[in-house]
Image: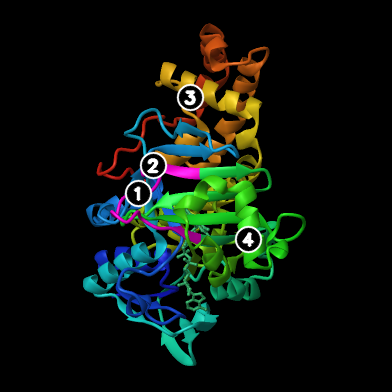
Amino acid sequence: MEKIVISGAGLVGAFWALALKKKGFEVELYEKRSDMREESADGGRSINLIATSRALNAFTAVGILEDIKKIVVPVTGRMMHSLEGELTYQPYGRDESECNYSVSRSLLNITLLNKAEEAGVKIFFSHDLESLDPDNGVAKFAGREVSFDRFFGADGAGSITRKELLRLMPEAKESVDFISSDYKELLMPATKEGDYPIEKKALHIWPRGNHFLMALPNLDGSFTMTMYLPKTGEDSFETLKTKEDVTAFFEKYYKSSIPHMPDFADDYFENPQGILGTVRMSHWAYKDKVALMGDAAHAVVPFFGQGMNCGMEDCFYLLSYMEKYGNDWAKIFSEYDRNQRPNGNAIADMALENFIEMQSKVADKKFLLKKAIEHKIENEFPTKYRARYGMVTYTLIPYATAKKAGLIQQEILEELAQGIEVVEQVDLKKAETLIDEKFVPFVNETGITLDRYQEGETPKYVS
Ligand SMILES: Cc1cc2nc3c(=O)[nH]c(=O)nc-3n(C[C@H](O)[C@H](O)[C@H](O)COP(=O)(O)OP(=O)(O)OC[C@H]3O[C@@H](n4cnc5c(N)ncnc54)[C@H](O)[C@@H]3O)c2cc1C
């Protein structure tokens, strides 16, 4: 039986180990850190993630969707909090059935580790990958040599697997680009009665130009808040040095959140400041021996909520090619590299675009008008129009195709927004003509289906 070794027991590594074990392989999973399950039974505090169609599809393929659904909170739209405390709700999808799932990263990781272990995966904690010799099928973890037939690098944005592939393939190139903002996690606790202090079914955003606060619900009535702020300059992490600075900053910009966040200033100084960046790599595989997946191949900024989703889709694509090519790993890896790498690059680009959008445009009138027009025409012409956000989030349309579709849609929305002030003035006849002329031919040509991926349906394997 083939022996598979995976480096990194984060979300993607743990899930992939489970998927391969279920396929009958001997699987060993190596993780640099100690066992997170021993640190805290509930996963402790962690960032929250949005799980959408691609992750759900992969979970379905491996038969764990129902287990995952027990640890998520459905979220149906964005709630914008203005400086004056006004609320504006923008539904995500065509209707409330199109929702995202908020989940604690550590709770999800623990669930996946438990599932992998139950299935028979051998997990080695405190074992960091040091070097890789794929041609001889040997990796070194914490000074120990481990043999393998196939090796997967799921060791995150700072991947040693990736560094080793760069060494082995002089033609390979990586790029690692950090953005000018960092993030910090804060907590909005549940009320004394254990209820959610603000609307439970929404992702909340307090957009304030070049910084913003975001909230995602947890299972226990609390919200995990993430503050995105420039590293330097006026209003930046650099300028918030004392509790008084942080309190004054919140009073000025995030006043409506303060009554619900008694400990924000303490949280600010207790919690680490995280960095955000994009990793791209020109080769995701080495011969028929090694493949990169998850953030090791394509770390993206979190502003489309797709980093983990894309990592789960990597697993799904690999599974589909394994089904197609059996044991021919050279073909499996080359098709994975050819098809999924452009998708990784596309979601990286779209996430960066959303960074700009969420920073400033969410408070821009023309932008909000175009969003409203898009929501209207999407509901009016559901069989022939689907917003890019919905394509990325609710369908399995490849990211690269969704990105191209988005460019055509911008042209349509730009034309429709010309000369009008409010969405009620939009000319629906003109909208249909534009859709028929510009968007429908693209849909036909690419053969995509605009229908939502139905959770629980038999996964469609990629062709
Ligand atoms: C603020 C924020 C919000 C986010 N929101 C979303 C969201 O809403 N939706 C979404 O889909 N994604 C989101 N993401 C992205 C998501 O968290 C990542 O894409 C996902 O965690 C990647 O999983 P991974 O397993 O590839 O990598 P990681 O989670 O980084 O796991 C890598 C693992 O490898 C281990 N490791 C590292 N080096 C070695 C080594 N040398 N040897 C052995 N083990 C090693 C690490 O300890 C770690 O356990 C967000 C990210 C951030 C920062």
Residue 15 quadrant = bottom left
User: The residue under label 1 is which amino acid type?
Assistant: Tyr
Whole-number angstrom distance, CA of label 2 to CA of label 4: 25 Å
Q: Residue 197 lies in magenta, yes or no? A: yes
Give the residue displayed 52% in from the left and 7% down from the top.
429
Q: CA distance from mark 2 to mark 3?
A: 21 Å
* Dots 4, 1 in contact, CB < 8 A: no
Residue underneath mark 1: 196
Identified by mark 4, the residue type is Val
Mark 4 crowd level (few <14, some 14–19, many ≥20, 10 Å Cα): some
Tally of numbered tags: 4
The residue stretch that appears in magenta: 186-204
In the displayed structure image, the side of residue 222 where residue 173 appears, left or right: right
Q: Position of residue 158 (x, y in %)?
A: 58, 71
Residue denoted by label 3: 375
Label 4, label 1: how far apart the Cα atoms are: 24 Å
Cβ–Cβ under 8 Å for marks 2 and 1: yes
- Residue at 24%, 75% in the rendered image: 120
Is residue 223 or residue 3 the one in the foreground? Answer: 223
**Does label 2 or label 4 sit earlier along the sequence?**
2
- In space, the residues marked 3 and 4 are separated at their CA atoms by 37 Å
Please name the predominant secondary structure of the magenta segment in the image.
loop
* Residue 187 in the image, given as x and y percentages of width and height: 46, 60
Give coordinates of residue 309: x percent, y percent: 44, 52
> Image height check: is 59 above or below 18?
above
Mark 3: give few (<14), some (14-19) or many (20+) Cα within 10 Å: some
**Which label lies toward us, 3 or 1?**
1
Q: Secondary structure beneath disc 4?
A: helix
